[in-house]
Image (spheres, helix red, strand yellow):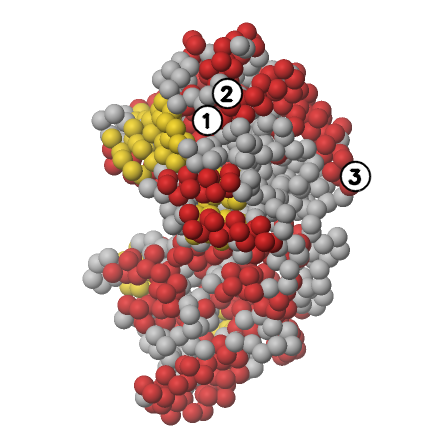
Amino acid sequence: MADEQDRTSLARALSSAVRGEVEFDAAARALMTMDASNYRRVPLGVVAPRDADDVAAALAVCRAHEVPVVPRGGGTSIAGQATGTGVVLDLTRHLRSVVELDAASRTAVVQPGVVLDDLRAAAAPHGLTFGPDPSTHSRCTLGGMIGNNSCGSHSVAWGTTADNVEALTVARYGGDTIGLTGRGGWDGAPTGLRELAAGHLALLRTGFPELPRRISGYALDALLPERGPDLVRAFCGSEGTLGVVTEATVRLVEVPSARALAVLGYADESAAAEAAPGLLPYHPLTVEGMAADLVREPAGLPRGGAWLLVETGGATPPDARAHAERILRAADAVDAAVVTDPAGQRALWRIREDASGTATRMPDGSEAWPGWEDCAVPPARLGPYLRDFRSLLAEHGLRGTPYGHFGDGCIHVRIDFDLLSGDGVARFRRFSEELAALVVAHGGSLSGEHGDGLARAELLSRMYGDELVALFGQFKDAWDPYGGMNPGVLARPARLDENLRFDVLPKRPVDVTFGYPDDGGDFSAAVRRCVGVGKCRTARPTGTDVMCPSFRATGEEAHSTRGRARLLHEMLAGEVVTDGWRSEEVRGALDLCLSCKGCRSDCPVGVDMATYKAEFLHHHYRGRLRPAAHYAMGRLPQWLRLASPFAGALNALARVRPLAALAKRLAGIAPERTIPVLAGETFTRWAGRRRPLTLPSDRVVTVWPDTFTDHLSPEVGRAAVRVLEAAGRTPVLLGRGVCCGLTYVSTGQLDKARTVMRRTLDRMGPSLGDPLVVLEPSCAATLRTDLPELLPDDPRATELAASVRTLAQYLEEYAPDWQPPRLDRPVVGQTHCHQHAVLGDAAERRLRERAGLTGELSGGCCGLAGNFGFERGHWGVSVACAEEQLLPSVRDAEPGTEVLADGFSCRTQLAQLAGVRGRHLAELLAEGCGPVDDTAGPRGE
């Protein structure tokens, strides 16, 4: 728009016309600058319509102001089509209802913002599902799938989205609404469309290649009389350039009662690709391929350099297995296996589904990008195409990791383009032009799943020729005569090397405090890790995953890992978010980040928002007054050391409500919280008065007296001592004053954290490098990761980090023959989020199994998360996180079930919200080892 006055006028007009949110502030705009592509376009504002009338009203206002519109679903588009310079319609906030589901007719009526997994969940009780299933099924929307004509792994059985849509209601630029039905004649067609098709029948019959994954361009051949005409199919895949879907009637398919997975190993990806077409006559549900360079840990895979994952269905498990075994016999594989265990199948599918993220980092850690993410060729040509593709990569000095839908001839790949320099971008263009020619030479489509967007639309003439591409422009004009719908995409496209999201980032490394070892010490590179696949936007965690609890609590993009990464990107760019480290937009988004570290493990590209938050807070408050909670809880170790001699008196005062309320107000603590009780005798004081045991030096183990165990839960430390002694070890406590620095890190007091960490290293003395048992998971995670990343130049930090073990890890590694007591009882609870993200819980699982502790611990986050849940203003989100999995699992537990919670935060949350005492695994094991002897071992150093 011309100026700020025009922008203000538009915002006012939209606010008057729609009931949904109208947001033109910097944060809202920054959140929508990018999708999951290489591209960035800055919108004027964002509208979240509440219903179809709001959509129409917004389109009318934008037409009157001559402002373009981009409809947006989950923002997982890989070609840039979900970005725009005008108004973005966020269809995920309100338009997310399954309006009707008719099991008899196998149809559902949905709004455009419905997440695919929500539709599948609604259909599942009827034995039905929606066939197309992109790997982003937990967050992509039906409107986005229709816009891109999405496909997914099961397209060999159930086709593309266009194959599964019966009717659409579409709002056009200007506000008028039309209804479209598949094969329903010309009813609803915009003026001139019928004549346009009739005048070019020969071109429509000859201009489109026949292959299962031809997604590029507009599907104008659907307008042929022998095909209906099918206006719905012609609209699908139009990438928001024709109108906005406000409602869709989709077809559902029957779900097989049982499934099996044939996993076939081949020498390389070309051999796997050449084998794939021969499996199609056996009617599999999937024929997915991936090569060894995508698989970091090939556990569960048969021998080979590449694999096909061929899923089969059946009425019973034996039927599904027999189907898979027939495929095994027909396949000329190097090695093969049939997986029928659902958990084993999920593990293999997770490798495949996370590929859109994991493939963004090469094995050596260098960056790789989309842009040529989903070309498709006839399946019979896939093997030769892949060989030529690899040769073309080599010619340009590029690397990529192909994977994808081998049964449909569709290949995904991330390539290590240099998109930061002028020379690198020029090579990106040359490679793109040559690859387009290669795809066409093999009879293929530039896009086989994700659409053309800004990445490939410029090259459509190489696939279709100038005459047909000119017809694309006329087709768009018939629908959108004013050119307001997502300009620059498909018709009259932007250049593929314009609008790259990296252009605006700093050209030199930003001065930061953490070392960012996996990103070459470059904070910009760390922020670039987020490619926008949006796994953090799932409405419910998968299995034991944690990420992203704040998004699940609020449902707002700003409180997702991706949203925060976008704001940090824009902070570095300085165009929309202009205040740098002082940005209130970034601070506001990070305020509800629990620093759970879940994204560090669950994000496919390893975004570590807890670290980025600590970095930001460090710079944001440098030289400024901090929130009271930073002084109170951020410096908790020093306050607890001062308070320890007066524990009894302070506990009594904390029970006086007016005094407790005043203390919480002064300390920035949520008024709903109860102040934890201080231990009458600390763990270190208890250890210091015991007579040491005498055992060989190779049986001595150092125990870390973390702040929480020492001052708030000494019973956990005493129990761990009993267990270690029962295992034939002599526990030795480090002296008082050592601290991991956790609370300083989580509040961004990084100078103080480094001072504390250096002092700790100085005090470690000769025990540095010996196995170190840390009982509090958050402290163990801090020592394992934050310590070496904050002190990257101190080799002692790396040495200490490598020595850290949980109790279970230590026992498994150093006392493998010890038999834990058989407790034989069920357990519930939650794996600490830091343990899940940094340390892993495999050893704990095995130890519980050996002790006869049955039952699975839940995923997610307890919601307290150290200082987060105690801070004023966080109570609602903290409770919502706990209510997601932890509290329901405890309420539903049978009488006599033990509640396990190794973290102090988790135990505190359980006590304060459910009145339940959670216990550390050490406490349960110690029960079976007999009472602890207060007079003998361990000793404090």
**Between residues 860 and 814, which one lies in front from this camera angle?**
860
Q: What element carries label 1?
A: loop
Q: Is residue 787 left or right of residue 866?
A: right
Give the structural element (helix, strand or loop) at label 3.
helix
> Of circles 1 and 3, which is in front?
1
Q: Earlier in the sequence, mark 1 or mark 3?
A: 1
Q: From the viewer's side, name the closer residue of 102 and 265.
A: 102
Residue at the disc numbered 2: 219
Q: Which of 505 and 920 is in front in this view?
A: 505
* Mark 1, residue position: 236
Classify residue 263 as left or right of residue 269.
Answer: left
Do the residues under discs 1 and 3 have CB atoms within 8 angstroms? no
Location of residue 703 in the rendering, given as x and y in whole percent from the top left corner:
51, 73
Spatial separation of the CA atoms under disc 2 and disc 1? 8 Å
Cβ atoms at labels 2 and 1 below 8 Å apart: yes
Q: Quote the CA–CA distance across marks 2 and 3.
A: 36 Å
- Secondary element at image label 2: loop
Three-letter code, disc 1: Cys
The answer, for residue 13, to whether it is visible in the render is yes
Q: According to the image, label 3 marks what residue?
A: 423
Residue 274 lies, with reference to residue 691, above or below; the image says above
Rounded to the nearest angstrom, the CA distance separating label 1 from label 3 is 37 Å
Q: Quadrant of residue 681?
A: bottom left
Quadrant of the image containing the C terminus: bottom right
- Residue 679 lies, with reference to residue 717, above or below; the image says below
Is residue 827 visible in this depiction of the protein?
no
Which residue is painted at 69% across and 50% down in the image?
A: 504
Seen in the image, is 136 located left or right of residue 202? left
Q: Is residue 48 above or below residue 178?
A: below
Q: Which residue shows up at 48% across the image and 18% down it?
A: 193
